[in-house]
Image (cartoon, helix red, strand yellow):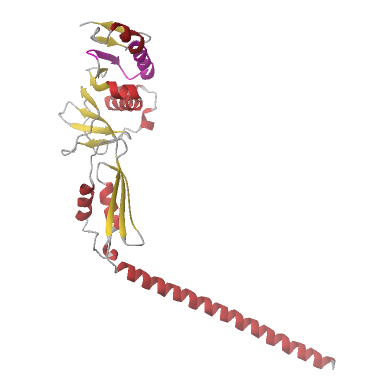
Amino acid sequence: MAGEDHSVVYEKASINEMKKKLIKILVIFLWVMLIGSFIVLLGFTNWEHNNLGCKTYIIRIDYGNADTLVTKADVYNLVKKTGNRLKGQLIGDIDLEAIERAIRHQPYIAHAEVFLTMDGVVEINLLQRQPILRIFNQKGESFYLDGLGHLLPLNPAFSARVLVATGFIDEPFSKKANYLQDSIQKKDSAEYRSVMINLYKMATYIIKDKFLRVQIEQIDVDKLGEFELIPRVGNHIIVFGTAENMENKFERLFAFYKYGLSRTGWSRYNVINIKFRNQVVCSKI
């Protein structure tokens, strides 16, 4: 009897083990079928989506505080040069990477994002560069310097109303030039030998100040690389000197405007000299 009981127990255990294996195989089979169906469905959906026509396109340009240098029409012309027309074009034939790459090479574009929505709309979101200074160099070239230190060509169709720099500026226009702010923090003598870096420093300082942004309209560079500022209000020039101690010099200029010219009148002096430390020297020409 004991032997028979053991045999029955063993037989039941074998049956249970077989059931577990069958259930495991069935579960694996179901998962394989489910994943396979999902892949087929996804492939069909992707095929169906790619064979739909693009409904339309949307171009958005963030100009920030800058004047217009690039328009939506300019951007769409770049799109067409890549061989894409977008509206009505099969979604599968639209090369979004080529479009974004072409737009990024446009000199006035700081950032570009191109993507396709689920409902078949191509969206193009752009950020225009912000010019802060227009430069006229000794080579007869004229170009912009933007807030990130990049040099930009002029646009014959549009003109940015920005601060102007003239005089002895030897550095030429270059598409690769980049006078980034972090590169001019080095306190070495080479910093003050670069006219362009000093112009960048001064322009960024001026545009951040509400009063200076309105009052100063031109920076003139002399043979020694020193600056004279031409204001909008008043018939005087401001002898600034080098870009060293810039903040202190402007503080003295503010103080003189507030406590000096407010009493004597804005037409009394032709020259306001702030190049020397702790001094404001005024004179008539």
247 part of magenta stretch = yes
- Residue drawn at (28%, 53%) of the image: 58
Let me know if residue 280 appears in the view: no
User: Which quadrant is the N terminus positioned in?
Assistant: bottom right
Q: Position of residue 243 (x, y in %)?
A: 33, 20
- Residue drawn at (27%, 8%) of the image: 265
Classify 25 as above or below 229: below
So how many labels did they put on this image? Answer: 0
- Residue drawn at (68%, 87%) of the image: 15
Q: Position of residue 232 (x, y in %)?
A: 24, 19
Residue placed most toward the observer, 64 or 137: 64
Q: Position of residue 154 (x, y in %)?
A: 19, 36
Classify 165 as above or below 130: above
User: Does residue 205 appear left or right of residue 88 in this picture?
Assistant: right
Q: Quadrant of residue 13?
A: bottom right
Residue placed most toward the observer, 208 or 40: 208
User: Which quadrant is the C terminus positioned in?
Assistant: top left
Classify 285 as above or below 229: above
- Residue ranking furthest to the right: 1
- Residue drawn at (65%, 84%) of the image: 19
| Numbered range of the magenta stretch | 234-256
Q: Quadrant of residue 99?
A: bottom left
Q: Position of residue 29 (x, y in %)?
A: 53, 80
Q: Quadrant of residue 257?
A: top left
User: Does residue 24 appear left or right of residue 224 in this picture?
Assistant: right
158 part of magenta stretch = no
Let me know if residue 149 appears in the view: yes
